[in-house]
Amino acid sequence: MTAKVLIIVGDASETVDTLYPYYRLIEGGYQPVVAGPQRRLFQMVMHEVKPGWTITKEWEGYSIMADIAFCDIDPEEYAGIFFSGGRAPEYIREDQDLLRITRWFWENERPMCSVCHGVEIPARAGIVQGLRMATVAKCKFDLEVCGGIYVNEPCVIDRHMVSGRTYHDHGHYIGPWIRALDVFTGKLEQ
């Protein structure tokens, strides 16, 4: 049976942050399960700091269907969880079911992964105290105010949390997270 892995999204999840791990999971022999506040179609966005800009410019990306709503998730059915970036985490981080799920994955030591603004979810869930994580620089405060330690590197692994700064880092941190899933599921020995 193919192990299932959650990908957490909402409206304004970053397109590349979401689709890169989605397809890498399939490539790695996993079943990605897209989860959102409701089981519906979500509008993703593209983010980039354009030449001459000092802030991120945003425009519409692809849409993605959530396979399951947060309230319907039994975390025991999943091998791991991925927190996509974009603006969505800022809006979905107060969802009590999402916080319950996030805490469960942390407490049960399942492979977790976060990129960019995705850090706002584990930070809000209260699991980052003393945890070293990468995130986009503008989320450094969100991490640190919750007790986490900001690391400006393309891949940071601390316990069972793997993190990257932005989509530019996907090639550095997604591979180690998939290897952690392989170890957890028994596809690969430690």
Image (cartoon, helix red, strand yellow):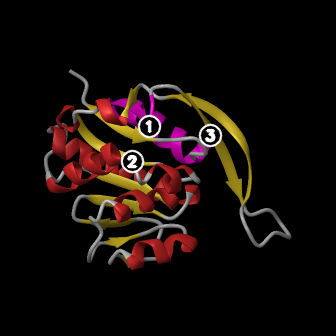
| Marking on residue 37 | 1
Residue in the image at 54% along x and 49% along y: 88
| Residue toward you, 10 or 59 | 10
**From the viewer's perspective, is 175 left or right of 2?**
right
Residue 150 visible in the shown view = no
Q: CA distance from mark 1 to mark 2?
A: 7 Å
Q: Out of 181 and 83, give the one closest to the viewer.
A: 83
Identified by mark 1, the residue type is Pro
Label 1 close to label 2 by CB (< 8 Å)? yes
For residue 97, side relative to residue 174 (left or right): left
Q: Element type at marker 1?
A: loop
- Please tell me whether mark 2 sits on a helix, a strand or a loop: loop
Q: Which stretch did the figure color magenta?
A: 14-38
Where the N terminus falls, by quadrant? top left
Given this view, does label 2 or label 3 mark the residue nearer the observer?
Answer: 2
Residue 20 painted magenta: yes
Q: Quadrant of residue 12?
A: top right
The residue that mark 2 highlights is: 95
